[in-house]
Image (cartoon, helix red, strand yellow):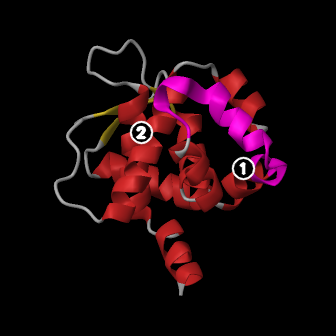
Amino acid sequence: MALQNEVQAMQNPALGAALIWRFACGYCPSATATRGAPMPLAFLVLPVVLHEQTRRAIGSTQQRSGFRQFQSNLDKEVDMLLGVQRRALSMRKTSLRATRIALASALLTLIPEKAELWPRSYVNPPAVAARVRELLRAAEKFGVWCADLSLFEIAGILRVEF
């Protein structure tokens, strides 16, 4: 039953849209931010946040510790780190569909010239299940960490190609 629930969550583009939106909120924490979240990062949110072991590693890492500490936690289990690329490729269509839903529902704005995603609102949804709140927090924390690094650094740490 748990596996079935995880598969349903991973294939739920509305949940994916909310996760990508919270990621963008973490990446650009205010409307006065100088840059939006690069579009390629939207394809990493679901493979990282919806993977239970990776999400636990996010949850167990203090936000102020940053991406490097998260990487250190992932390095302990090499399979998790090496699986990000495979999961990103297998979830491409779901990530794209989720991004389209986030754009269509006005959660995000896409600046085509820069290929950047900007959140249109920073207000958390009112009452959501505890499990969904955990996912949203993980996506936002992941966004905060990614904002401090370049795409090149993120790709190197997570061992992915854009």
Would residue 90 be found to the left or right of residue 46 on screen? right
Q: Residue at x 30, y 51 (%)?
A: 104
Within 10 Å of the Cα at label 2, are there few (<14), some (14-19), or many (20+) other Cα atoms?
many
Q: Is residue 39 left or right of residue 33?
A: right
Where residue 155 sits in the image (x, y, percent)? 72, 31
Q: Position of residue 158 (x, y in %)?
A: 73, 37
Is residue 77 inside the magenta stretch? yes
Residue at 57 percent across and 37 percent down: it is: 41
Q: Is residue 55 magenta?
A: no
Q: Position of residue 67 (x, y in %)?
A: 61, 28
Name the mark on residue 140: 2
Amino acid on which the number 2 mark rests in the picture: Glu
Which label is found at residue 84? 1
- In the image shown, does 158 or 36 lie closer to the viewer? 158
Q: Which residue is found at the position 54% from the left and 81% from the top? A: 2
Q: Which segment is the magenta one? A: 61-82
Question: Label 2's element?
Answer: helix
**Main secondary structure type of the part rendered in magenta:** helix
